[in-house]
Image: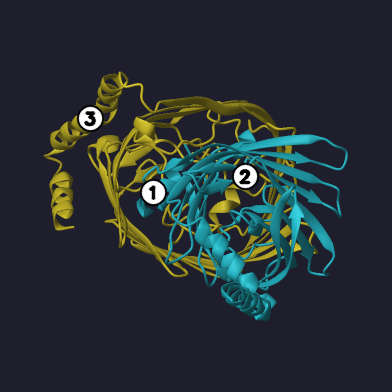
Chain colours: A yellow, B cyan
Amino acid sequence: MSRVDGLFVIMKSGSNTNWWRRLFSTGLLLILVAPALLLAQDKKEKEGVYQEFSGYFGFDYRYFFSDGLYPEQKNSFPSLILQPEYLYEWNNGDDRFKFIGFGRLDRDSRRTHFDIRELYYQKVTGNWEISLGLKKVFWGVTESAHLVDIINQTDFVESFDGEEKLGQPMAQFSYTSGIGTFDLFYLPYFRKRVFPGSRGRLRTPFIIGSSDVAFESVAEETRPSFAARWSTFTGPFDIGVSHFHGTGREPFFRNTPGGAFELFYGVINQTGLDIQATTGSVLWKLETIVRTSDFQDMWALAAGVEYTFYNIAEKGLDIGIVAEYLHDDRGVLSFSSLDNDIFSGMRFAFNDVQSTEFLIGGIFDLEKSTRLWSVEGSRRFGNSWKGEIEMRLFNKVDPSEFLNVVREDSFLQFSINKYF
Amino acid sequence: MKNAVYTFIALLMAGSLSAQSPEAKGLEIAKAADAYDQGFGSSQTKLTMILTNKQGQESTRYMSNQTLELTEDGDKSLIVFDSPRDVKGTATLTFTHKEGSDDQWLYLPALKRVKRISSDNKSGPFMGSEFAYEDLSSQEVEKYTYKFLREEQINGVDAYVVERDPVDPKSGYARQIVWYNKQNYRLEKMDFYDRKNALLKTLTYGNYKAHKEKHWRAGEMNMINHQTNKKTKLLFEDYVFDLGFTENDFSQNSLRRASR
């Protein structure tokens, strides 16, 4: 801690930008070049080699029921997506190279985007695991908010619920022991959140361009972040404790001297705790974070239960009920509208050959009128096609909430994907 | 005279066997079957699951399974799905316990999320098939109570027929009738009775092979649901033993990696 804080002070003085930049270039070089060298060297051994191409492509159509609040916004968005994946394993899987790409073509120029979700080399030796490259890491237990999850930037144009993420450059060391798993992350490069363009929906009145952004760190994106996590399980409990130091993934909104809005990425310290207790058919879940920075201190909590009725009337139907309470003590500066809300949802899994599933949920503000409804459904067709529907409804959004800017953006989406 | 003594001893033994209660004899057979397969260490196999609906339409799934034998507690296993392709990489890690509920984690590759799940779902269908989760979990002796019924021939071999009742009240079955091969205790057939005690399903085993000389593994399992006329066939291929797995190979990191 003290060492990291020390670095923080040096950085803030502004005199040591070069140090960060040097660390960044060395780090990135190692992360990108080392796997290539190792790959080239090891490829000679043909033992235990396995490779596979996979992925999916698809078409989706999103329709917004009402005209947008801002000029230029469209109502219907046909879209094409492609996610190619490649895996190369050798030494019986102890060494692997993995690639996942993602691309979308959309009417909204910003939603048309391409990303490398994953491109990493991984080495496993006994209890150790080392990954170098772009990767996605998930932490947490709750369904309606992902507070603890902080390694990857959210792919905001891709998903409104924040579950899609951008690939994060990293060096990850993971050690599994009798007292749990220890993970250490060095994250040399920061990725900015991308926001919808002028034709797009689910956006602020102003377009947030990639240059309308300010950083606390003079090294901007090249200011590295560090994270550590310990996770374990004992009896019914699964526990994770994590700490992150670096540029926060979630921006603050602030006014510029000229009166316009600007996004601001501050340097934060975030400590997170996630616990799940699995007792019979009930899952008890808790996630909480404390975040400190020079601009804002905050804590947030998500806690709830998930109960599943299995194999109802011996027809294979499972109905799961989720209820979660969300609290966030931030004020207007935040993106989050989950300040004092209840999430409640029902999941229907038919467990049929086509894996038919539905999820119906709502987030209800306890003090304000705001309600956010969602319906998601999916079903397989044949062996490799999948159809999905998604609907989000913004209802009675309170004018004081951040969500007020998207109050007219209720939509229905159909998608069909072919997996290969 | 000598013969008479032997006859007497034989009669005495037969007497003691018949005096043994059906419950004790059933348990003895289950324990003997468990002991017979002890020492397999660890194994890995590829599975093909063929689902047939009432109309005879088939759909096929591929997956792989790794198992680590533990004697103090139940086995640990890892199942990874390869097809249907939309669930490719979905994987489950299960720690079976001889007593109490099992521990189970599910890995969702799209979210990179490991989720501890309830193991209460015993009777629900596995991947839309005619196999319930409990049909595929590690068959620990302690999970049932037993009653020896009779001996009879099945598929041209002598078999013990034993009724076993699941201890867990969440089981979907009132009872099961199991045909154990008398020679090597491998399972030949199983009848499943639902909670209303009506015949629900029949499982038959075929294409057995002995691995490491005495560890018999079926190459084929056929489950027929008598109430819906749906069928599921499980084919096991490329069994490998002695891979030197340790408990480290059944961690949450292993679960993520197994997903590929």
Chain designation of label 2: B
Determine if marks 1 and 2 fall on one subunit: yes
Q: Quadrant of residue B87?
A: top right
Residue found at x 79% / y 45%: B231
Give the class, few, some or many, for how many residues have Cα within 10 Å of label 1's Cα (few <14, many ≥20).
many
Label 2 sits on a secondary structure element that is loop
**Residue holding disc 2:** B218
Q: Give percent across and percent down for residue A105.
A: 59, 24
Q: In front: B193, or B123?
A: B193
Label 1 sits on a secondary structure element that is helix
**Residue holding disc 3:** A30
Label 3 sits on a secondary structure element that is helix
Q: Are marks 3 and 1 in contact (CB under 8 Å)?
A: no
**Residue holding disc 1:** B249
Which label lies toward us, 3 or 1?
A: 1
Q: Residue furthest front?
A: B1
Would residue A230 be found to the left or right of residue B83 on screen? left
Label 2 – label 3 distance at C-alpha = 49 Å
Q: Give percent across and percent down for residue B60.
A: 70, 35
